[in-house]
Image (spheres, rainbow, N blue to C red):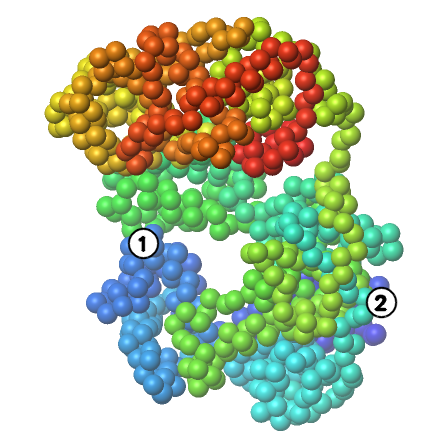
């Protein structure tokens, strides 16, 4: 390749990455590089707009908000408050940008809407467009959606280029084709183009210009004379494509590491290996396991992942709602902002120096790149501060956090293997490629540009449909696979995720060559600790030395392993704090309220009095959270019937003798113990009552012989210390009834037998229980290996 040939050639590529790729390859051939330029820069150089200044994104949103100030706009269901409008304006701009790129006037949509399904929306959008256009033109600011009607073609720039070579990997809009036609008057233009069955939209456009293109070919096109200069059959999807499925997303990280290692072993250079993420959220997981810094992430890292952002966001969330989760997150990241922010959070922005406060937070940012981004975004944000009049500090900070979350921090760690999205792969060839998340939700992704028009209307207007956009994504993936020596694909196959149907179109089959445990071992080094199997532990034990409760006996009878953990090893369970109270916690509050009630007064003969005092006691024991208050309010409704039932019992002669009574008594050489919820008395007759707000079990003549729960039998034996005539029952606070223990005598015989057996115990083996139903809610199930 000669010096003159290169210097007169201008090569237009879709991305800066494609340019770097070409330059590295060209350097090996010659020292003289052709003039490379991206498609975006090329278009901007072809167009000149005089007397207009550039439009910043913030100003753009504000001007569109101003343009939307008319009554009918509310029909679009987009709120006009700045916070909401900022998030939703992108849909409107994408729609306008699409019409502009296709040189399609919005008023013509009425003709395409044959059945007048979108007449109202089109009318509103047309008025919004005209209002926005008028405002921009009056202020002399240039939004790119008006570029096609404002530009002047830069013929002097094109005259100096002479030989333009455009690599088309995707789609050319009508505006881009119009500019290329104008270029033809001053320079030679060649298009380099690959066809697949997925990019028929652009093939149709080029066929209309005079080219006769077929699927599955690589073309060199003379755009000036509308001739095909060269064509050859495409390579097609390479045979060396492997595809595996996983049940867990995280295992795809191990898949990436294993396949990349395999590529390196084969001699592929790290610079020629790429990891493609259809869904970028997995990038942070991959980065977490990149101990050797082998990867560089083209998408960067979201500012929302910085400690500073997490600290500010966690502080705001904790101020707004002091939930267990928010509290844990707040104390984990630090409380440095809390005192200052708490004082101003709900104040009007006019009452505080908010930007002075936000500026003072810079001292907590240690990283220079993060600090530069923060200062830049804060400066731009301050330029629209006048628009926040009347808003409170909370809303403005939320908007600022939303803004920061959209900013990316460049990855400067220096890894040689690039992690990128599929758009970055255009016009780039790799040796080895790994693609993950190749499922129906991500490949292809659904576009958000179809918000205002349906497919039929788009077809009538000859605008790109959702199917066209999805096919374009498929086209990119097919070219990526065709241009690579070797490709490895992975996806998650679960209830929430299924393989992309695109795999079948590419004739790629899934074959899982390794166990998932093998991949897991790549991420987590298994540790083998020699320990004695719990099944083999024989424990020396003497029940004569313990206070035997009904729950303790029940655990021993159902699972020796659990008894060993709880009462021999004394391992306590650990409950993770949650905002949703557990059933037993609500029951405990009701128990305590009833204890407090009947300790103060043992008889009630008036339903209203009982209800009033019971509800007061419930309020006093209720915790501060809204969820606790809500659940106690539900209990109050249930206990209204309880109050009526109680008064009937008191009128019948019963009164409360004891509440939450702790008792112990000897029984056949053992000491049994228990806490009785309530003991009522009528003349010399005692009624032992055990409150139940949830489930409880009553045995029948057919089931009592297998009984393991002897709670009422224990209470009966304990209550006999207070009197001889004793009955026992569960007090059902859900259905408001007293359920008597009808099998008391029979169960006492079985209990006596069990106690006698316990007296003989000198040791026991810590075997797992036979019935796994006891394991489902057991706090020790992981420890014991069940």
Picture coordinates of residue 293 (x, y %)? 72, 43
Q: Nearer the viewer, residue 542 or 459?
A: 542
Q: Nearer the viewer, residue 20 or 155?
A: 20
Q: Quadrant of residue 125?
A: bottom left
Circle 1: element type: helix
Q: Quadrant of residue 221?
A: bottom right
Picture coordinates of residue 393 (x, y %)? 31, 40
**Which residue is located at x 52 percent, y 21 percent?**
750
In the image, residue 78 sits, relative to residue 282, either above or below, namely: below
Which residue matches tag 1? Answer: 82
In the image, residue 689 sits, relative to residue 388, either above or below, namely: above
Residue 552 in sight? no
Circle 2: element type: loop
Q: Which mark is residue 543?
A: none
How crowded is the residue under tag 1: few (<14 C-alpha within 10 Å), some, or many (20+)? some
Which residue matches tag 2? Answer: 29
**Which residue is located at x 76 percent, y 57 percent?**
512
| Quadrant assignment for the N terminus | bottom right
In the image, residue 681 sits, relative to residue 45, either above or below, namely: above
How crowded is the residue under tag 2: few (<14 C-alpha within 10 Å), some, or many (20+)? few
| Quadrant assignment for the C terminus | top right
First reached walking from the N terminus: tag 1 or tag 2? 2
**Which residue is located at x 29 percent, y 48 percent?**
388
In the image, residue 135 sits, relative to residue 232, either above or below, namely: above
Q: Nearer the viewer, residue 764 or 485?
A: 764
For the residues carrying marks 1 and 2, which lies nearer the camera in this image?
Answer: 1
**Which residue is located at x 37 percent, y 10 percent?**
720
From the viewer's perspective, tell me whether residue 622 is left or right of residue 242.
left
Could you tell me how far apart the alpha carbons at marks 1 and 2 are, in whole angstroms?
55 Å
Picture coordinates of residue 158 (x, y %)? 60, 79
Q: Nearer the viewer, residue 467 or 755?
A: 755
């Amino acid at each position: 390749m000669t010096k003159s040939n290169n210097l007169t050639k201008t090569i237009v590529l879709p991305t800066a990455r494609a340019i770097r790729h070409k330059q590295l390859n060209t350097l090996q051939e010659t020292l003289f590089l052709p003039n490379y330029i991206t498609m975006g820069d090329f278009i901007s150089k072809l167009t000149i707009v005089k007397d207009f200044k550039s439009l910043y994104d913030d100003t753009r949103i504000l001007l569109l908000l101003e343009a939307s100030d008319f009554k009918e706009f509310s029909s679009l269901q987009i709120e006009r408050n700045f916070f909401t409008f900022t998030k939703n304006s992108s849909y409107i701009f994408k729609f306008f940008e699409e019409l502009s790129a296709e040189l399609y006037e919005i008023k013509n949509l009425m003709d395409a809407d044959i059945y007048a399904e979108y007449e109202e929306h089109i009318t509103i959008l047309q008025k919004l467009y005209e209002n926005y256009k008028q405002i921009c033109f009056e202020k002399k600011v240039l939004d790119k959606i008006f570029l096609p009607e404002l530009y002047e073609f830069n013929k002097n720039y094109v005259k100096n280029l002479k030989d333009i070579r455009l690599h088309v990997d995707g789609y050319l809009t009508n505006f881009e084709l119009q500019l290329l036609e104008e270029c033809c008057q001053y320079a030679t233009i060649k298009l380099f183009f690959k066809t697949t069955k997925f990019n028929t939209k652009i093939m149709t456009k080029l066929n209309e210009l005079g080219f006769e293109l077929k699927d599955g070919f690589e073309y060199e096109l003379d755009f000036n004379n509308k001739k095909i200069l060269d064509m050859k059959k495409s390579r097609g999807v390479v045979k060396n494509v492997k595809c595996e499925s996983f049940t867990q997303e995280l295992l795809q990280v191990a898949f990436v590491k294993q396949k990349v290692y395999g590529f390196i072993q084969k001699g592929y250079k790290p610079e020629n290996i790429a990891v493609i993420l259809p869904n970028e959220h997995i990038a942070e997981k991959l980065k977490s396991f990149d101990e050797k810094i082998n990867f560089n992430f083209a998408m960067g890292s979201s500012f929302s992942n910085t400690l500073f952002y997490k600290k500010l966001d966690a502080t705001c969330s904790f101020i707004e709602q002091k939930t267990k989760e928010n509290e844990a997150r707040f104390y984990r990241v630090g409380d440095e902002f809390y005192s200052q922010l708490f004082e101003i959070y709900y104040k009007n922005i006019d009452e505080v120096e908010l930007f002075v406060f936000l500026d003072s937070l810079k001292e907590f940012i240690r990283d220079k790149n993060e600090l530069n981004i923060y200062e830049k975004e804060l400066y731009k944000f301050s330029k629209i501060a006048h628009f926040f009049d009347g808003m409170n500090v909370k809303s403005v900070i939320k908007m600022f956090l939303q803004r920061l979350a959209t900013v990316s921090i460049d990855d400067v760690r220096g890894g040689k293997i690039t992690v990128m999205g599929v758009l970055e792969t255009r016009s780039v060839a790799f040796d080895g490629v790994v693609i993950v998340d190749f499922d129906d939700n991500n490949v292809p992704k659904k576009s958000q540009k179809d918000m205002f028009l349906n497919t039929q209307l788009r077809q009538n207007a000859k605008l790109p449909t959702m199917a066209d956009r999805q096919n374009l994504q498929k086209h990119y993936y097919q070219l990526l696979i065709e241009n690579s020596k070797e490709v490895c694909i992975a996806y998650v196959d679960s209830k929430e995720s299924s393989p992309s149907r695109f795999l079948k179109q590419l004739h790629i089959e899934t074959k899982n060559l390794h166990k998932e445990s093998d991949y897991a071992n790549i991420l987590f080094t298994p540790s083998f600790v020699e320990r004695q199997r719990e099944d083999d532990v024989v424990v020396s034990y003497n029940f004569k030395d313990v206070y035997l409760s009904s729950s303790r006996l029940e655990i021993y009878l159902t699972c020796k392993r659990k008894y060993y953990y709880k009462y021999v090893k004394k391992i306590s369970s650990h409950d993770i704090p949650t905002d949703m109270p557990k059933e037993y916690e609500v029951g405990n509050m009701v128990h305590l309220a009833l204890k407090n009630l009947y300790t103060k007064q043992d008889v009630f003969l008036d339903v209203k009095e009982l209800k009033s005092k019971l509800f007061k006691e419930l309020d006093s024991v209720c915790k501060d959270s809204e969820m606790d208050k809500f659940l106690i309010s539900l209990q109050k409704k249930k206990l209204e019937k309880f109050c009526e039932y109680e008064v009937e019992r008191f009128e019948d002669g019963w009164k409360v003798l004891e509440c939450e009574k702790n008792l112990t008594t000897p029984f056949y050489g053992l000491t049994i113990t228990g806490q009785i919820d309530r003991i009522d008395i009528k003349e010399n007759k005692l009624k032992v009552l055990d409150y139940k707000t949830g489930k409880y079990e009553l045995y029948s003549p057919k089931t009592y012989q297998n009984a393991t729960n002897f709670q009422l039998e224990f209470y009966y034996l304990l209550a006999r210390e207070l009197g001889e005539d004793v009955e026992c029952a569960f007090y059902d606070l859900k259905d408001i009834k007293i359920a008597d223990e009808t099998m008391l005598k029979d169960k006492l015989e079985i209990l006596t037998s069990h106690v006698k057996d316990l007296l003989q115990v000198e040791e026991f083996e810590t075997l797992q229980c036979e019935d796994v139903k006891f394991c489902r809610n057991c706090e020790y199930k992981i420890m014991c290996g069940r």
